[in-house]
Amino acid sequence: MVVRLKDVAEHAGVSIKTVSNVVRGEAHVSEATRERVLRSISELGYRPHASARHLRTGRSGILALAVPDLAAPYFAELAAAVIAAAKGMSYTVLIEETGGDPEEELRIACGLGSSLIDGVLLSPLRLDQEALASRPRRVPLVLLGERDYELPVDHVLIDNVAAAREVTAHLLSLGHTRVAAIGAQRGAASATAQQRVRGYQEALYRAGVPYDPALTCEVSAYRLADGVRAMRSLLDLPEPPEAVFCFNDLLAAGAVRAAADRGLGVPRDVAIAGFDDVELSQFSVPSLTTVAPDKAELARLAVTALLRRIAEDSAEEPPAVLYAGHRLVVRESSGAATS
């Protein structure tokens, strides 16, 4: 049976016009009402007639999502969440990989040079504020991730400082006092790393544990091999760490491998925790304790914010900073699994 706009309105207990406003991404709908309508759309399986809507509005129905590295599990899972969120609002998502190239990031921020792109979701690494501010084509834009920009664009992120503080506090609560961190970085592209270092340091301070710079390992990238190398350097210290907080799950998996190569058990000899809760973290041996950002909420917030910017009557609204939730998932690698 074909689900009509009227059916969604009756199911959600709102007017047909309200449902239409939600589908079009209009701004003048309360968040509670928007959530109710989106739930009804999902439960009923309603799919707006995209071609008719786009003919009426003059929009293509295509959004662009640009991330630094699609091979990274976190970005692949985030992309899937964005596609699902956009599909529920009858939009198609074009995926682009930037490799952290500032020129490519600027090209995408300008709409890829195409009038067919209605708006852009961008997770930038090296695009500086001045270049972004001077982009020639003012395509609606929403930023993802933890870079700090003072620009009139919406920004969707998680609280990295709080999340890092929580996972470090968990390791400290197990009785470990030598807790290391793998994932520090320097430079303009390292806002995420710097925030996680800050959260790690705050947890140490609150627990009365002195900060030891020798226990903070820098990495050039967040890949398995980087985790292996960093963990080896920590294990070579005269007094190796009792626990290690890795700034993503790939680094953590590499750290587990390096420990195993030395004949060490995880968590028997060293506890390890990661960040991102990608699929491998649940099925690795041992399963990884990790921070789980709410990727579905992050995607929903980002797509909804972008559709509001695409709507003509919301284009001049002040920029918003929107936070998605996160939770600590405790598994085997820290030695205190609860889930």
Image (cartoon, rainbow, N blue to C red):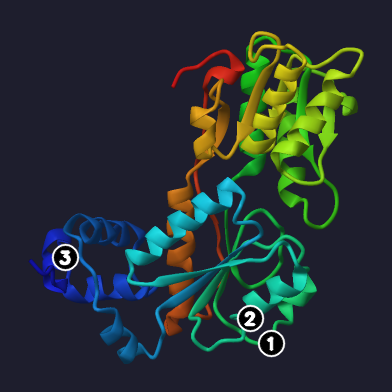
Q: Amino acid at mark 1?
A: Pro
- Give the image quarter of residue 67: bottom right
Residue picked out by circle 1: 136
Q: Quadrant of the C terminus?
A: top left
Task: Indicate whether 306 appears above or below 84.
Answer: below
Q: Amino acid at mark 3?
A: Val
Element type at mark 3: helix
Q: Residue at x 11, y 70 (%)?
A: 2
- Between residue 78 and residue 43, name the one nearer to us: 78
Residue hosting label 3: 8
Does residue 314 appear anywhere in the picture? no
Q: For the residues labelled 1 and 2, say whether their Cβ atoms are less than 8 Å apart.
A: yes
Q: Is residue 224 above or below residue 261?
A: below
**Which residue corresponds to mark 2?**
110
Residue 295 placement (x, y as % from top left): 48, 48
Rendered residue at 21%/58% (across/down): 40
Contact between marks 3 and 1 (CB within 8 A): the answer is: no
Q: Where residue 6 sits: x, y (%)?
A: 12, 72
Amino acid of disc 2: Cys
Q: Residues within 10 Å of mark 3 (few under 14, many from 20)?
A: many
